[in-house]
Image (spheres, rainbow, N blue to C red):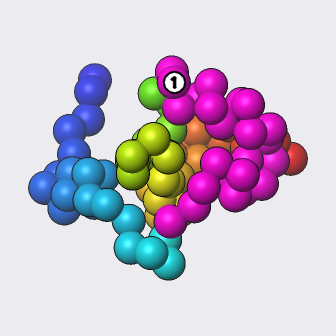
Amino acid sequence: MATSLTPLQNEELFSFPAPEDQLNQTEVAALFGRSVQTIINWKKKGKIPYFEIGRFPVFSKKQLTQVASRNQHLIKI
């Protein structure tokens, strides 16, 4: 059974992160304990949410934390 997002969750999912919430690919790799190439691959496959400023990806730490809490296999211990 698919779950739908509540309006607040949907708004949070698509709102651009505040400066203090923004991470770059290297920071995301460190957060997940993975390589930068893995983060690039996940981004291309749609496994993690991101935004782009020009050609640079920007990630929301808050959104990534939510994704990680639902997908524990993404985190390398």
| Residue 32 seen from this side | no
The answer to whether 52 is drawn above or below residue 12 in the figure is: above
Residue that carries the numbered disc 1 in the rendered image: 44
| Residue 61 percent coordinates (x, y) | 53, 62
- Specify whether residue 61 is painted magenta: no
Q: Quadrant of residue 12?
A: bottom left
- Specify whether residue 32 is painted magenta: yes
Side of 77 where 7 appears, left or right:
left
Magenta: main secondary structure: helix
| Residue 28 percent coordinates (x, y) | 66, 52
The answer to whether 3 is drawn above or below residue 70 in the figure is: above
Please, what is the three-letter code of the amino acid marked with disc 1?
Lys
| Residue 37 percent coordinates (x, y) | 73, 31
Instruction: Give the residue drawn at x 57%, y 61%.
Output: 23
Instruction: Give the residue drawn at x 22%, y 45%.
Output: 5
The answer to whether 54 is drawn above or below residue 11 in the figure is: above
User: Which residues, given as a range, are shown in magenta?
Assistant: 22-45
Q: Quadrant of residue 73?
A: top right
Which of the pair 56/76 is nearer the observer?
56
Instruction: Give the residue drawn at x 81%, y 47%.
Output: 33
Which of the pair 2/77 is nearer the observer?
77
Q: Quadrant of residue 72?
A: top right
Outermost left residue: 7
Outermost bottom residue: 20
Instruction: Give the residue drawn at x 38%, y 73%.
Output: 18
| Residue 64 percent coordinates (x, y) | 53, 52
Which of the pair 67/41 is nearer the observer?
41
Q: How many marks?
A: 1
